Amino acid sequence: MNEPLMTIKNVSKQYGNHLILENINLSLYDNDFIALVGKSGGGKSTLLRLIAGFEPYSSGEIIFMNQRITSLNKQMRIMFQEDRLLPWMTVSENISFRSRGQQIKEKALSLLELVGLEDFANYYPIQLSGGQRQRVSLARALMANPKLLLLDEPLSALDALTRLNMQELIMDICSKQHLTTILVTHDVDEAARMANRIVVLKHGRKADEISAPEDKTNTEEINLIAAQIKTLILSD
């Protein structure tokens, strides 16, 4: 097997006397799509923040591309539930924020085409729907050609149909661009549909790691895996 892109070794996180994460171990490889699932307060988003370098872990280590993570790495980008677009900038300007030049402009337009918004470059965020704004956020995240894409429940506020379309878009882009991806989600059906591996966190610990169906058109198998995960999350 190839060397992992990222290795999480015995990582724990403590706030005061409250242990949020305990001895988490996980390896990610090129093109992996991993979903982190579990109840609220189980440590999913905390683990993602540690991976992103937003805050330090209390013990253990996270190695990404042979370097210990101590701060945000330029080879990572993150999408949040909120789109965090700057309202005074156009869609194109939001994507190419702080970067200038003809090549940057052309790349921004190319990414807008990739996410299906090529006709919206000069629109402002307030003129877009929630789904369109998250498409812009995705394009912005891809602008830096990251090796690792972090998704912190970016689809949770969308309606069902828009969410389904965004799932398809993210899966397609990640597959074609060979992006390693970590998704935090409360939706186990979404996890089973999008990921190739699902990590279940319970009470700050890694309870299990489950392989998802390779055939993402096999609804019956996806539903079975989702049901298995739900049972595991709800069990004591």
Image (cartoon, rainbow, N blue to C red):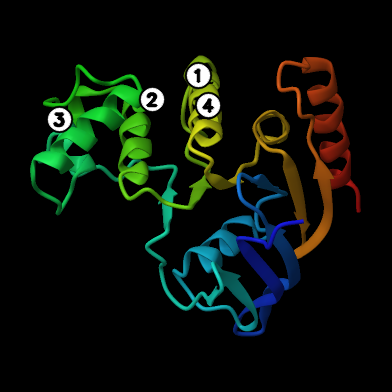
The mark lying in front, picked from 4 and 3, is 4
**Residue with the mark numbered 4:** 172
* Quarter of the rendering occupied by the N terminus: bottom right
Q: Amino acid at mark 2?
A: Gly
Q: With respect to residue 11, does 48 lie above or below?
A: above
Q: Earlier in the sequence, mark 2 or mark 1?
A: 2
Task: Please tell me how crowded label 3 is: few (under 14), some (14-19), or many (20+) other residues with Cα within 10 Å.
Answer: some
Q: Is residue 77 left or right of residue 56?
A: left
Q: Amino acid at mark 1?
A: Asn
Disc 4 to disc 3, C-alpha distance: 26 Å
**Residue with the mark numbered 3:** 124
Q: Is residue 224 left or right of residue 11?
A: right
Q: Earlier in the sequence, mark 1 or mark 3?
A: 3
Query: Could you tell me which residue is drawn at 83 percent across and 44 percent down?
Result: 210
Q: Which mark is residue 165?
A: 1
Q: Is residue 58 left or right of residue 22?
A: left
**Residue with the mark numbered 2:** 131
Task: Please tell me how crowded label 1 is: few (under 14), some (14-19), or many (20+) other residues with Cα within 10 Å.
Answer: few
